[in-house]
Image (spheres, helix red, strand yellow):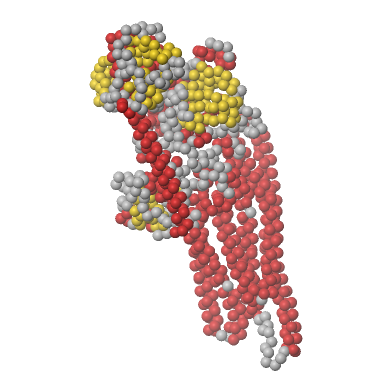
Amino acid sequence: MDVLDSPATLQAPILVEGGNHRPLTLDDPRLGWRVEDGYVDLFHLAGNSGRRRHLFRAETGALLFGVGAHDGATLVAVGSIGSRLSGVEREALAGAEDFLPHAEAWVLRLTDAATGGEAVWPDRVAEPGERSLGAGERLHADPRRPLWLTVTEGQAAWLGAPATVAGEPPLPMVDRAWIESAGGAAVAVTEAWPDAATLWPAFDRFHALALDRIGGRIAAQADSEVKRAQRSRDSAKDSLAQALGGLSDLVDGPASATAMAPAADPLSAALAALMAQMGLEEPLPRIDAAGKPASETLDLMLAAARLRGRKVILRDGWWRGEGAPMLGWLEEGRVPVALLPTPAGFDMLDGGGRRRVTQEVADLLAAEALHLYRPLPAHALGAAEAIRFPLRGLGGDGMRLGLSGLAAAVLGLLVPVATGFLFDSAIPRADTGQLVFIIAGLVAAAIGSAAFDIVKVMAVLRLESRIDGVMQAAFIDRLFALPVGFFRRYTAGDLADRALGLQTVREILAASTVTGLLGALFGSISLGLLAVYDWRLALIATALALLSALVTGALSYGQLRHEREHIRRQGRLDGLVLQLIVGIGKLRVAGAEPRAMAEWARGFSAQKSRAVAAQRYGNALETFHAAFPTLATIAVFLAVALLMESDAKQQALQALAATPGEAPPAPFSTGSFLAFITAFGQLLAALTEMAHALTKSLTVLPLLERARPILDTAPEVPAGRDAPGELQGGITLSRVGFRYAPDAPPVLHDLSLSIEPGEFVAIVGASGSGKSTVMRLLLGFERPDQGEVFFDGRAAERLDLAAVRRQIGVVLQNGRITSGSLFRNIVGTAPLGLDDAWHAARLVGLDRDIEQMPMGMHTVLMDGGGTLSGGQRQRLMIARALVHRPRVLLLDEATSALDNRTQAVVTASLAKLSVTRVVIAHRLSTIRDVDRILVLEAGRLVQSGRYEDLMAVDGPFRTLASRQLL
């Protein structure tokens, strides 16, 4: 690499022409450089490898300093075409008027390069003066001002460097910098810059530490890139192996796993085996778990695989019963294993292979396991696919149900057959033995039929419970995964009615479908027996059955029309009732109870009118099926009489024309007639059962139609989206346009803006300017009609938005306090402790308020937090956003209800953070100290700059501010 070396000695300033072909090494710590024209990119040059890593860009006027060479590493400056740098001895630069701000910018940029933009959540911030640090205690820089720190006693590490510092010279402490006491230390902090004798030794120490940390960070990044590439290769191998396995299954049939993949880590291998058991075809995404605790790694992997789970206790004998796939852990070493259900119990799959769970194996397992739930496919579902989903793995119960129903139907044939034999043979002959035999056979058939009915009922119960456990959990999971825009189309009550309608569908179908199918099976067998006795009467019975089906279908169609409208109006009424209950306070304040009652009465009467109309058809159907068996029996009796008369005449004619020795045809005997009537009664009973099942099932169709939008809408994050990794906080909107409906006016017009990692930005504008819409786009609640939203330069459209949101702290205008303790309201369901909750409370100035409450952090709040003041509720929601230490903070008018003192505490806490902060504000006094203000007007960015700069020029911002300053 052709590198221009710095001159060994410098008698007078020199000018260096920039350009990629003339890189300048900054390895002489005696020299300083000023960018006279153009810009210069600073790179880290690592030893003999010759590989350069970009750190930052210095614009015209910036100062650069020689950093020396440490372990073969140094900095290289590469200027733009036409750029020029002037070099002098660094002592000469110290006399310039702009030395301090440019030197501060140099230190800040080099510190930022050393931290890699790492988010900083300071527990203790440096203040001028002396203080002691306990062992392992950290002291963070104040991002609002540069400070100089001297370790007067003990030792401390700068940014976690292996080497410790002590004594003079002092260290510069700027934004993102921190030190950690090695074993207890005392420090002295001052705002004053060191004198000439101390300044350059302090710079030399700082440069050495910065180069060491930059080198370590770059090495860690390189290692991470190697691991990421390896994960990508492993993922491709897994995908190929799965595809080839599918091809082999076409020939050999599906095979069950007998051992975990030896190359995979135990957790990934166990989850992959569980996913295969549940029939999930997507390969398990690979997660970078380096440095993360086991619980966080598990949560990330479950989220990437779209799996949800709940902890269960493995009680004595758990493996003997039935269950769902579970993730377990060996007691020794907490090694993850897969617990797979089988017809005979459970198998355990680990690195040693697959083995049956026995008492000895169960003793090796920890007492807790994770019960996993299978999600619905991540695309729009058709009706057939939705029906097939919960039936996977239920073939055994379905087979038992079908065979028991068939056996019961066949045993039911013994009644008409025995009836015919009894009246044709046993009774005329007074054969007591034969009579006893027939009675014993009927008793045995009844006992067998009862046994088959028990098997059938048990199979139905098993099917119900397993379908309910799979489908209800998957359906609720699907609701959570739907795009936020979906929920705007329905009221909360209406959507709850649609979602819970599936539970009603399951209950109705579990009872009526089985009954209807078994009735159809029983009726078909009975109809076959009728044909055996007399095919002509069987045709009449078939005609009667068709007539019953025709009338049933016509009445059912009429009922369905009204039932569909009745359920639709019931959903709207449920939504209205919920809104009235939630808004009861506002109704009373406005004195609008009579109008609310009138609105409810109109909806209720419209719903009930449809219910009454549907019930009329239902009553007609019930009346028809109550009368039809009697009428059908009368019709059969008439048909038998006519057929017997016709047969008697035909027999008489045949007897006259019969040849000697030819026997006349056998007449339709009494036993045969009674057997036929008995079988016909069974057919009528089956038809009645089918009609009742159909009547009950009519409600299913409207309920399914109302639930269809939930199934037809694709999840917000379809399968295959990229994991975002750890966000740095960079946000870009590129030429974004958006409107809430195709026929609505546009809210944003070709909006472009960029927010740097760690920047504190406020978005202001008049009502309707698009501020909250920008917030919704950043959260992924809406998708732009044109343009793109980027996080760290990656399009949000291609990222897993759920994983992105997990790294964003949000306070919205309509945020609510949930019922529960203050602690749970702050940390939610995250595995965080009381120290984390107290830290978040201190950041927003809520700690003193909580300390004055009777139960402190465990004080219980009602839904909505009515016992708290408006300011306390806002601070609690801000603490909730901060407790997870997100990489990006989005605050929508988060301090509007705070008094001036509390607002100052919250603003100061936010200013100390080094994460990206985006604030939407109406009170302009809250954003005086932000890094940049973005002014929106009618969906366009019209101004950008600091508070003082925007107030100094005539424009929309000054107009907004002047209204509040009056």
Judging depth in this view, the residue of 918 and 872 nearest the camera is 918
Locate residue 671 relative to residue 913 in the image: left or right: right
Residue 122 visible in this rendered orientation of the protein: no
Judging depth in this view, the residue of 62 and 915 nearest the camera is 62
Does residue 476 sit above or below 744 in this rendering?
below
Locate residue 54 relative to residue 189 in the image: left or right: right
Which residue: 51% across, 21% down? 762
Which residue: 36% across, 32% down? 222
Total count of labels: 0
Where is residue 38 shown, x and y percent of the image? 45, 15
Where is residue 965 shown, x and y percent of the image? 55, 13
Extreme-bottom residue of the structure: 660
Does residue 273 sit above or below 527 in this rendering?
above
User: Where, by quadrant of the figure, is residue 584 drawn?
Assistant: top right
Which residue: 43% across, 12% down? 36
Where is residue 332 shown, x and y percent of the image? 29, 47
Residue 364 visible in this rendered orientation of the protein: yes
Quarter of the image that includes the N terminus: top left
Locate residue 239 relative to residue 212 in the image: left or right: right
Where is residue 677 shown, x and y percent of the image? 65, 73
Quarter of the image that includes the C terminus: top right
Does residue 556 sit above or below 145 in this rendering?
below
Which residue: 43% across, 34% down? 725
User: Where, by quadrant of the figure, is residue 23 drawn?
Assistant: top left
Judging depth in this view, the residue of 162 and 952 nearest the camera is 162
Judging depth in this view, the residue of 911 and 35 nearest the camera is 35
